[in-house]
């Protein structure tokens, strides 16, 4: 190689000049020791690289544009370490000063060396026709947290976080939604098989990489459950001939506590002002009436007003007492006594390695968290994974993953959880100045508690300051997952694989209330049967605590048989697999009847009567103690067949096809519905490999496309009525009874979603800029949608599910990575830009497809033709009138007849008095990540942005204020005097309350805001301690600091105050 | 060759799959296929029994709502209903929706029973389950026609708008309103069909029995003003159960302000237990106070005044219901109600003395021991009828019967004028006004295209 290059080089610069140059450099070398040369790639092009002399402190240098370099050395013998973007790191020994003509091997411009793991096979990304995103271990390590899925946030193109959580277990979606009423979660695969356990079980440090499959290829590989995308998590494994690698990792994180002053609420003074208003209007008369009978408490300020009105208090006293209340803010109390910053510690040790015939990986993880309210959880992970090469044909792998998690503790009360007769009260005190606990009359009136029972009852006061100490909950979870795989390579081109995985997760939930807790004291008192004449008390609930435990278990078995065919000949390459899979999941839940009179040590418990009703103390109402839920058992079975073939010609053209058929025993399916075939087909073309391709600055250009179908049959939607058995209903009959849980509808069909994906991968300017651009379009037909119907046919349900809608989703996923600087100071930028647009294309029920049905909060899917699935509309706003009433429109006229306005919108369907805002989920979103590196330092900052959407703000609702004490700062902005209608949109406080007036304002245009924002997700600073400089073979030590959730950098509309809890983490990593 | 092996393996495997997939997936869910399943649905008392519509009582004159309580009501439809104003009744959880949920449950049972094998159909349990489903459905239709239909009038019933007679669980079938006459015929037909398969008396009176079906027929004919038949069915019912509680001995009367319900839900007077389980409109004792004139009509020694009602600052509120709690109004059939039907019909048939004796028998169980004002047994027929009707109102307060009574009695020229006073305004409902057929939910009308009242 170098001879050819030397001659080539010599031709260019002239032989003489070359010889002279050679001689002079030799001279110089003796004196100054300058190492010279040129770095080229296989095609003879110069490459910019970073050069470093191994085991020295000499400054790092880089080559010029044409690859030539000059480097100071202090010895003519040594080794060069050549690194750079898109090239394989080279260790180049030298024993003279050159010039050295060094050829480096280009990596396929960043993308091509990435393997995508579909869970069935691992293929180089360049051969994939589908849409994949891969997140590697380094990228995973940039963020801190316990949930592996959260690491995808902002890092992956096409994955959205924090979207609405209805019908979702995980808070993320891949490329928006493709169903209206079906399941919305992506399928999670951990090491080849669907993961049914708690995702928190997976320790993030155990993960090697995550592959996200976004298009129809996902569904055709993984079947019916993959309609929302697939996330494949691959854990770290050893590699053959790797030697032993040890990774140690420690993180400590602290998270700010909630800023209670940013939660919408009223100040004590405002709240008391409202209470006074309502009191004067007589709004509390019914409460006062019921308080007499049921002994329910009245809020302290209303008590004072009432006592004053009845002449039991002087006006000076009442003013003084009210002033005391105004001066005490519950938020101070919660903040001082109950809220603490949250903490988290995470440690892991990972040992991996491999010899020729065996590889191994062990890991140990430990994690400990304490929430801001004192909930603690501890998790331990143990993992082992081994591969054995028995002989040339047979390979074996075995592994196990064990998780133990425990959470619980004595949880302090959350803000506003201490109430007075169900109402939030902002002026409660939990402790006096000396820190002694004060009672709060949350459930019963003080004068009743103080006198009832003539001393025969337990203290009936509730002390929020201490009460939580007497109640604890404990959840433990143990999970074991074991797998074994057997690989038999019959011929070099044919391999058979059998895999089996067993998972068992067992959870136990314990509740213990000590006798000191208000809950127990109240229960014991309520069931006390007092005989005042004899002065005796009979206790139905024995003196003592209460303990209950329930258990749940999950048990999954998976088996897979697979044949892999892989053959290359001439310019052809075929990779195919065919296989089948069988799986069973059992779920089981066993509740336990509570034990009363409980004392843990020495163990004590007493029998109680769970059958007969007893009069309760306060009202005399007959009640039965206890009651429990049903044991629950579920077995799901699945059988699948799948096949996948990819043919590549000349390393340029790839065609792929995959198909899958699933069947399950899920309830209610008729036999002929059990099998559901899905397929996808794809093509890819590496344009840059073509002879005719002659764009010198473009290193890579590939096109790929897939099309395929996925489907969804919600198993609960069937042609038969399905009933669920419920408990015997207590006092009435004790007979087993059933609830009809699903409406029979024999007109239901499968949902069908077709998806087209077109992608373009490119790299230009020697890999300085690379990226991918993808366009997709999905069309869902016969989607299940909640449909308004004449409920005479079924009763009591406003909507039924019918195949009533079609949707179209379109989007663009763009990912750009640019290497801005690649010298001593490195700077890399990754930009992600996603467009997600969807709309309801057809909705077969016309009555329900009007704009008016979008009037709401925009948090659930509402199909209206031509509009996004999540979207928002409002009543047309006509301002406040001279009395502070919100005004709308009837036909073209201003009106305050809210009922007629609602009717016009919902029944007559006049769209002109409905204002359509737009999508309530972001249409444009993405992130911008910048990484800087200088020597051992690196700094990464991630910004995310979401644009083009609206949301409904919360506002004051006077009925909520009156009945639940729920306040909102908009209260201060309300209409008070004539003329205020020019300044505010918040209606006046009135009594009697009018539900329609409130509803109208709640859903009118002034309460909608733009949600567009830019958010600073995290900043990560990492320092690699240059220990290898001290001695070769020393561990590589990284220390890092991470700050996450730094808050909004920009918001289009800042009307609403938002809290963000920043987290600070420090940690270290040692690699041996 | 390899392909062939693979395909062969798959074929063998597939054959084994069907049995693998036949396993039932959950212990909690089932299709309605066995008699046990049907019985379990019928045992769902929350839906079959505790679902009586509250719209009748919310519209009738046993209650009123004091101004300060009225002001506290935030729900517009509640406020409007109280003054018979046109409003938006459109919600699935409204009385219309809950009534038809009971109908739906009954229809699911009937359809499942129909699909069973000939052998199963021979079983007594099968016939009983079917009869029970018919009774529940008839009861729902009957409660409904009293609210949403005009009072039965032989001359117009064939044209007056009645209920939707839904007899299958098909959710795709369009709803059509049948006439009042058809509705009553359906009820009578179904009850007669059911009677022969029912047990005389139910173990727990949530289960339909012969007595219950007779009772419902008595109510049906009474509301049709076919008094002779009504009286006969009431008698048939009383033949099976005529026990009465004596309020002197069988009841512990709580303190005057106590909200404790003095009755047991399944006391010996209960023949068929149904209650208003939830209130869509403001008619619960939290809001509604018993009409003052009605309260004054009880004699001092009439224990019902003290047993049924509780004193509050607003007035007398209902507490004595044959139900689980003091706020659930009993709407089912009691022996006392049947005696009152029997008595009324006897008086109407001019068996005045027999009727009055029955009333007196009831009064001995309701008044303080020994201090019962004597009944004048020599009353005229008219006096006796007036007297029986007053007694009926006093005994059956808040039983979801008053609305029907007002409607049928106004048909006989009793000129009962309903009045509401709200914040100084007076609202009137004139006898036989069309508003006596309460409006169907607006959204149901919009979605189905049915005619509104």
Image (cartoon, rainbow, N blue to C red):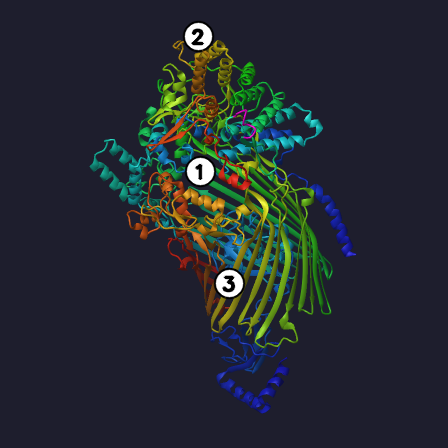
Instruction: Name the residue beneath numbered marker 3.
Output: A833
Q: Please identify the quadrant where the N terminus of chain A is shown.
A: bottom right
Q: Nearer the viewer, residue A304 or A244?
A: A304
Badge 3 local density, few (<14 within 10 Å), some, or many (20+)?
A: many
Residue A809, by quadrant, is bottom right
Q: Is residue B156 magenta?
A: yes
Q: Residue furthest right?
A: B1
Q: Nearer the viewer, residue B375 or A758?
A: B375
Q: Is B319 placed above or below B452 here?
A: above
What's drawn in magenta, residue-wise? B152-159
Q: Do the numbered discs 1 and 2 sit on residues whose CB atoms are within 8 Å?
A: no
At which x and y percent is residue A28?
A: 50, 86
At which x and y percent is residue A918?
A: 47, 55
Q: Is residue A821 left or right of residue A505?
A: left
Q: Is B308 placed above or below A992 here?
A: above
Q: CA distance from mark 2 to mark 3?
A: 95 Å
| Label 3 residue SS | strand
Q: Is residue B402 left or right of residue A639?
A: left
Instruction: Name the residue beneath numbered marker 2.
Output: B378
At which x and y percent is residue A1017?
A: 44, 59
């Amino acid at each position: 190689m170098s001879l050819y290059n030397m001659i080539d080089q010599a031709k260019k610069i002239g032989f003489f000049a070359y010889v002279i140059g050679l001689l002079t450099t030799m001279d110089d070398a003796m004196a100054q020791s300058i190492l010279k040369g040129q770095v080229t790639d296989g095609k003879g092009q110069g490459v910019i690289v970073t050069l470093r002399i191994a085991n020295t402190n000499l400054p790092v240098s880089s080559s010029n544009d044409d690859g030539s370099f000059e480097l100071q050395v202090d010895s003519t013998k040594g080794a060069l370490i050549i690194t750079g973007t898109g090239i394989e790191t080279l260790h180049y020994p030298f024993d003279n000063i050159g010039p050295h003509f060094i050829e480096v091997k280009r990596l396929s411009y960043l993308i091509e060396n990435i393997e995508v793991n579909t869970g069935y096979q691992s293929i180089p990304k360049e051969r994939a026709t589908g849409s994949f995103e891969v997140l590697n271990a380094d990228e995973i390590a940039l963020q801190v947290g316990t949930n592996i899925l959260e690491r995808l946030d902002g890092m992956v193109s096409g994955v959205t976080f924090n979207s609405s959580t209805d019908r979702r277990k995980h808070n993320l979606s891949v490329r928006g939604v493709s169903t209206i009423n079906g399941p919305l979660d992506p399928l999670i695969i951990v090491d080849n098989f669907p993961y049914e356990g708690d995702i928190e079980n997976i320790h993030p440090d155990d993960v090697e990489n995550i592959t996200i499959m976004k298009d129809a290829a996902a569904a055709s590989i993984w079947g019916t459950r993959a309609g929302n995308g697939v996330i494949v998590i691959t854990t770290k494994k050893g590699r053959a001939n790797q030697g032993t690698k040890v990774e140690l990792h420690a993180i400590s994180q602290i998270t700010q506590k909630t800023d209670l002053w940013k939660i919408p609420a009223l100040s004590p003074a405002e709240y008391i002002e409202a209470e006074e208003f309502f009191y004067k209007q007589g709004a509390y008369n019914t409460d006062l009436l019921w308080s007499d009978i049921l002994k329910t408490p009245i809020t302290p300020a209303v008590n004072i007003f009432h006592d004053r009105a009845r002449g039991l208090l002087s006006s000076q006293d009442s003013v003084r007492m009210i002033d005391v209340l105004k001066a005490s803010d519950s938020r101070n109390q919660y903040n001082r006594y109950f809220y603490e910053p949250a903490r988290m510690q995470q440690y892991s040790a990972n040992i991996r390695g491999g010899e020729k015939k065996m590889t191994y990986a062990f890991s140990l993880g430990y994690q400990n968290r304490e929430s801001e309210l004192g909930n603690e959880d501890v998790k331990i992970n143990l993992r082992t994974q081994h591969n054995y090469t028995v002989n040339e044909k047979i390979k074996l792998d075995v592994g196990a993953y064990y998780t133990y998690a425990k959470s619980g503790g004595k949880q302090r009360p959350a803000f506003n959880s201490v109430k007075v007769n169900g109402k939030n009260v902002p002026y409660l005190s939990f402790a006096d100045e000396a820190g002694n606990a004060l009672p709060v009359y949350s459930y019963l009136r003080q004068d009743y508690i103080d006198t009832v029972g003539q001393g025969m009852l337990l203290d009936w006061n509730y002390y929020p300051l201490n009460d939580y100490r007497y109640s604890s909950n404990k959840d433990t979870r143990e999970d074991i997952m074991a797998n074994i795989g057997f690989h038999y390579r019959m011929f070099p081109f044919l391999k058979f694989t059998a895999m089996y995985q067993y998972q068992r997760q067992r959870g136990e939930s314990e509740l213990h209330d000590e006798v000191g807790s208000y809950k127990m004291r109240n229960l014991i008192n309520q069931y006390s049967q007092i005989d005042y004449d004899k002065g005796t008390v009979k206790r139905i609930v024995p003196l003592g605590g209460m303990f209950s435990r329930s258990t749940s278990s999950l048990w999954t078995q998976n088996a897979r048989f697979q044949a892999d065919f892989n053959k290359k000949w001439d310019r052809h390459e075929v990779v195919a697999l065919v296989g089948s899979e069988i799986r069973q999941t059992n779920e089981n839940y066993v509740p336990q009847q509570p034990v009363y009179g409980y004392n843990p040590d020495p163990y004590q418990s007493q029998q109680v009567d769970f059958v007969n009703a007893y009069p309760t103390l306060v009202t005399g109402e007959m009640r039965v103690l206890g009651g429990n839920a049903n044991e629950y058992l579920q077995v799901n079975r699945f059988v699948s067949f799948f096949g996948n073939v990819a043919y590549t010609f000349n390393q340029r053209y790839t065609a792929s096809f995959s198909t899958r058929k699933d069947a399950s025993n899920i309830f209610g399916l008729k036999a002929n519905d059990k099998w559901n075939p899905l397929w996808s087909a794809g093509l890819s073309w590496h344009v840059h490999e073509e002879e005719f391709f002659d764009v010198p600055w473009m290193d890579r250009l590939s096109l790929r496309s897939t099309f395929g179908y996925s489907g969804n049959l919600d198993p609960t939607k069937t042609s038969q009525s399905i009933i669920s058995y419920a408990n015997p209903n207590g006092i009435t009959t004790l007979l087993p009874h059933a609830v009809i849980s699903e409406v029979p509808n024999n007109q239901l069909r499968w949902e069908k979603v077709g998806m087209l994906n077109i992608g373009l991968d490119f790299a230009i300017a020697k890999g300085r800029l690379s990226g991918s651009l993808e366009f997709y379009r999905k069309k869902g037909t016969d989607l299940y949608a909640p449909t308004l119907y004449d409920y005479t046919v079924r009763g009591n349900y406003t909507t039924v599910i019918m195949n009533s809608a079609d949707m179209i989703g379109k989007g663009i996923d763009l990912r750009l990575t640019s290497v801005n600087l690649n010298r001593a100071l490195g700077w890399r930028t990754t930009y992600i830009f996603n467009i997600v647009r969807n709309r309801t294309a057809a909705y077969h029920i016309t009555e329900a497809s009007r704009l008016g049905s979008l009037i709401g909060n925009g948090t659930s899917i509402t199909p209206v033709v031509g509009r996004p699935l999540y979207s928002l509309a409002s009543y047309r706003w006509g301002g406040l009138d001279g009395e502070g009433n919100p005004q709308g429109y009837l036909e073209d006229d201003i009106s305050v007849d809210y009922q007629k306005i609602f009717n016009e919108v919902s029944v007559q369907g006049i769209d002109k008095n409905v204002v359509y805002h737009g999508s309530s989920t972001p249409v444009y979103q993405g992130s911008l990540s910048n990484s800087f590196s200088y020597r051992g330092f690196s700094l990464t900052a991630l910004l995310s942005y979401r644009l083009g959407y609206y949301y409904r703000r919360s506002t004051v609702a006077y009925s909520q204020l009156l009945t639940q004490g729920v306040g909102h700062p908009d209260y201060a902005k309300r209409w008070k005097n004539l003329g205020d209608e020019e300044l505010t949109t918040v209606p006046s406080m009135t009594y009697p309350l009018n539900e329609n007036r409130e509803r109208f304002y709640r859903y009118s245009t002034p309460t909608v805001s733009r949600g567009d924002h830019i958010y600073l997700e995290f900043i990560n600073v990492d320092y690699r301690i240059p220990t290898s400089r001290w001695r070769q073979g020393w561990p590589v030590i990284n220390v890092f600091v991470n700050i996450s959730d730094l808050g909004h950098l920009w918001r289009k509309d800042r009307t609403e105050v938002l809290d963000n809890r920043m987290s600070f983490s420090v940690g270290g990593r040692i690699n041996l | 060759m390899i392909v062939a092996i693979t395909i062969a393996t798959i074929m063998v495997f597939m054959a084994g799959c069907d049995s693998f997939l036949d396993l039932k997936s959950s212990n909690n869910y089932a299709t309605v296929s066995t008699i046990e399943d049907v019985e379990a649905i019928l045992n769902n008392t929350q839906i079959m029994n505790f679902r009586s519509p509250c719209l009748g009582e919310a519209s009738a004159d046993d209650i009123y709502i004091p101004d300060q309580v009225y002001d506290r009501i935030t729900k517009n439809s509640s406020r409007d209903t109280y003054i018979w104003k046109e409003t938006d009744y459109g919600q699935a959880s409204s009385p219309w929706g809950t009534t038809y949920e009971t109908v739906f449950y009954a229809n699911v049972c009937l359809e499942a029973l129909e699909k069973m094998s000939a052998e199963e159909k021979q079983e007594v349990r099968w016939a009983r389950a079917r009869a029970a489903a018919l009774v529940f459905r008839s009861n729902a239709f009957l409660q409904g026609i009293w609210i949403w239909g005009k009072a039965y009038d032989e001359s117009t019933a064939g044209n007056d708008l009645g209920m939707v007679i839904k007899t299958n669980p098909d959710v795709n079938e369009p709803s059509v309103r049948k006439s009042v006459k058809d509705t009553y015929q359906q009820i009578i037909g179904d009850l007669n069909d059911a009677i022969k398969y029912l047990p005389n008396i139910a173990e727990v009176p949530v289960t339909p029995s012969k007595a219950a079906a007779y009772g419902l027929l008595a109510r049906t004919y009474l509301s049709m003003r076919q008094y002779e038949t009504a009286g006969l069915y009431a008698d048939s019912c009383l033949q099976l159960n005529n026990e009465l509680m004596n309020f002197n001995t069988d009841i512990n009367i709580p303190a005057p302000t106590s909200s404790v319900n003095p009755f047991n839900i399944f006391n010996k007077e209960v023949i068929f237990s149904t209650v208003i389980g939830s209130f869509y409109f403001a008619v619960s004792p939290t809001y509604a106070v018993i009409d003052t004139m009605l309260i004054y009509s009880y004699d001092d020694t009439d224990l019902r005044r003290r047993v049924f009602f509780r004193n509050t600052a607003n007035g007398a509120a209902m507490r004595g219901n044959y139900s689980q709690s003091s706020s659930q109004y009993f709407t089912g059939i009691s022996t006392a109600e049947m005696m009152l039907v029997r008595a009324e019909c006897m008086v109407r048939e001019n068996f005045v003395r027999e009727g009055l004796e029955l009333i007196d028998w009831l009064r001995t169980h309701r008044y303080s021991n020994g201090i019962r004002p004597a009944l004048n047994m020599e009353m005229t027929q008219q006096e006796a009828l007036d007297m029986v009707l007053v007694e009926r109102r006093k005994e059956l307060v808040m039983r979801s019967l008053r609305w029907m009574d007002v409607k049928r009695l106004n048909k006989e020229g009793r000129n009962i004028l309903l009045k509401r006073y709200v914040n100084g305004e007076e609202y009137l409902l004139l006898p036989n006004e069309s508003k006596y057929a309460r409006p169907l939910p607006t959204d149901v009308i919009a979605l189905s295209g049915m005619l509104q009242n």
